[in-house]
Amino acid sequence: MKLDCALAMEALEDAPGVARAAEAVGFRALWANDTKHNPFVALALAAQATTRLELGTGVAVAFSRSPMVTAQTAWDLSRISGGRLLLGLGTQVKAHVERRFGMPWDPPVPKLREYIHAVRAIWRTWQDGAPLRVQGAYYTLNLMGPFFNPGPNPKPHIPIFIAGVNEGLCRLAGELADGFILHPMHSVPYLREFVLPRIAEGLAKAGRTRTDLEIHAPVMLAAGDTPGALAAAVARARSRIAFYGSTPTYRPLLEVLGYADVADRLRRLMAARQTQELAAQVPDAVVDAIVIRGSYDDIGHQLRARYAGLADRVASYWPFAPAEQADWARMARAFHAGG
């Protein structure tokens, strides 16, 4: 099992230093989200500062970019990093696609299927000289002259990961993707009872096996070496669970734990803008199912134990903090000691 970490998307200029520290700790990959800054730009900076660290978009919003833009950006980043890119793609939700990005919203599963086929078709054109012929319901691509063709990549394989919550994207990942990224509000029952069976359906449809796909689990951790620090970390995680739980798309994550009523209450409070009351609605049992808590050493051991046989790579949902590098190194040592 691989141990990864997340990059804080606050200040792009910090990315090289964070990446160097992450590589020194021994993390396998650094994942950047598509939030305040462009994750590809952040990872380009990280690529120049490292030699071994894999670099993942965790995730880049697919439908805010054309397949050609994503294909070109990923191709370039893979080249400058020596083939270390993991391309994580997500659909986002309708409100963000339409109102934040100003792009049309279409049924996400068939559109993402076509999107991934288009990206891979573009890469084949550049790598092998295959004619570009993409004709689908959402994308038509058939123009690629030499002036616009970057040519072959020394390491052309770029793994594509899909992020998702609901049934369709789980099945699509099994059928088509190189990896699946869990939502950070997941639990082991959700992974075991909801995600894995549907990924298995997709794998079977495509004639693939579980070894053809990596499952990546960003995990909400509550780390602290004192009771006060641990209580603050748990409160932080509870607040984030409440925020995510208020989104209707994420209802299955609570429903599988038997707390659909909590999801409904959170949604009503968010609609009423009563955000200060959200965290109090999250029961301790939900926190216990989602969050791993303890000292950094305890968390390292628990991460490996909880996800053994279920996930292929794990990471803290919270960004890696170089100022706390010694503590993160403790977690990494404990994690690897169990391997």
Image (cartoon, rainbow, N blue to C red):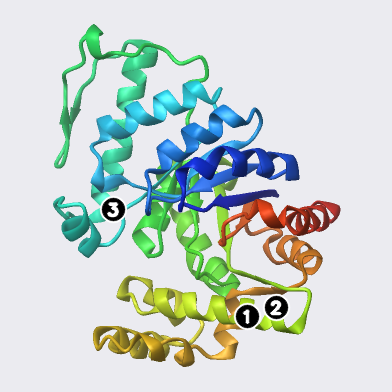
Residue at 50%, 22% (x, y): give it: 80
**Residue tagged 3:** 109
Q: CA distance from mark 3 to mark 2?
A: 41 Å
Residue at 49%, 37% (x, y): give it: 43
Q: Position of residue 177 (x, y in %)?
A: 44, 42
Q: Is residue 92 left or right of residue 329?
A: left
Where disc 1 sits, the SS reads helix
Labels 1 and 3: the sequence-earlier one: 3
Circle 1: residue type: Ala
**Residue tagged 2:** 229
The residue nearer to you, when weighing 266 against 100, is: 100
Where disc 3 sits, the SS reads helix
Q: Is residue 18 left or right of residue 134?
A: right
**Residue tagged 1:** 232
Q: Position of residue 75 (x, y in %)?
A: 40, 25
Residue at 38%, 12% (x, y): give it: 128
Circle 2: residue type: Ala
